[in-house]
Image: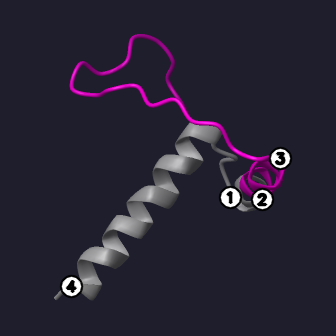
Amino acid sequence: MTQFGRPKTNTKAVTLRLSNEMLEALDSERRNQKDIPTRPEMIRRILADWLEQKSQAEK
């Protein structure tokens, strides 16, 4: 279960705007996940996957 409350101290907030089309695609992908993550969590997962793929490609 997602926990809310005070954020970790070793993080920084990032604010971004997304087009309606990007939000629709993001929400669609969220609904495909078993736990239906929040938008920020889905963005974290997508970014983590991208960084992992980039890291693997550089080897």
User: Which residue type carries mark 3?
Assistant: Asn
In primary-sequence order, the first of circles 4 and 2 is: 2
User: Which residue type carries mark 4?
Assistant: Glu
User: Which residue type carries mark 1?
Assistant: Gln
Label 4–label 3 contact, CB within 8 A: no
User: Which residue position is annotated with label 4?
Assistant: 58
Q: Is residue 26 above or below residue 7?
A: below
Placement of the N terminus among the 4 image quadrants: top right
Mark-to-mark CA distance, 4 and 3: 33 Å
Residue 23 highlighted magenta (yes or no): yes
Q: Quadrant of residue 10?
A: top left
User: Which residue type carries mark 2?
Assistant: Ala
Residue stretch in magenta: 1-28
User: Which residue position is annotated with label 2?
Assistant: 25
Element type where label 4 sits in the image: loop
Mark-to-mark CA distance, 4 and 1: 28 Å
User: Which residue position is annotated with label 3?
Assistant: 20
In primary-sequence order, the first of circles 1 and 2 is: 2
Q: Is residue 36 left or right of residue 48?
A: right
Q: Position of residue 56 (x, y in %)?
A: 26, 83
- Please name the residue shown 42% across and 68% down the image: 50
Label 3: few (<14), some (14–19) or many (≥20) C-alpha neighbours in 10 Å: few
User: Which residue position is annotated with label 1?
Assistant: 33
